[in-house]
Amino acid sequence: MADPFRPAFEGLKQVADGLIVANEGIKKLADAVLSARDEHEDLRETVARLEGLVIAQTADIRAQAEQIRAQAEQIRALRERLNGPAR
């Protein structure tokens, strides 16, 4: 005699198998999202450090440019003293 509940249980088994597969997919997706979030945070920190380095380098370059201008003025003054005023 055929079991009248067998099709229902087979259907439930298929649903359970589908949920297991879906759950694995969700876990993989969640892992990927967490990994991407961590990488995003790492990139933000790297960008912040690079911004700080660029700002520091810019300040150094400006200071060096000011020193060069001052040295150029000193050279002009020395030339004037040695050769007289430029014509």
Image (cartoon, rainbow, N blue to C red):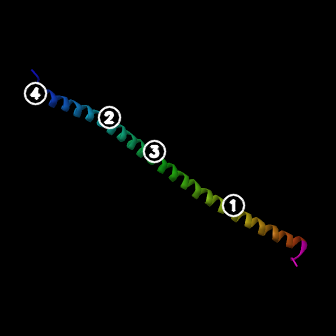
Marks 2,4: beta carbons within 8 A = no
User: Which numbered circle lies on residue 64?
Assistant: 1
Q: Which residue is label 2 attached to?
A: 24
Amino acid, disc 1: Gln
Q: Residues within 10 Å of mark 1 (few under 14, many from 20)?
A: few
Mark 3 / mark 1, whichever is N-terminal: 3
Mark 4 / mark 3, whichever is N-terminal: 4
The residue at the point 69 percent across, 60 percent down is 64
User: Which numbered circle lies on residue 39?
Assistant: 3
Disc 1, SS: helix
User: Which numbered circle lies on residue 4?
Assistant: 4
Amino acid, disc 4: Pro
Distance (Cα) linking label 4 and label 1 = 91 Å
The answer to which of 35 and 72 lies nearer the viewer is 35
Looking at the rendered image, the disc whose residue lies closer to the viewer, 3 or 2, is 2
Distance (Cα) linking label 4 and label 3 = 54 Å
Distance (Cα) linking label 1 and label 2 = 59 Å
Residue 18 is drawn in which quadrant?
top left
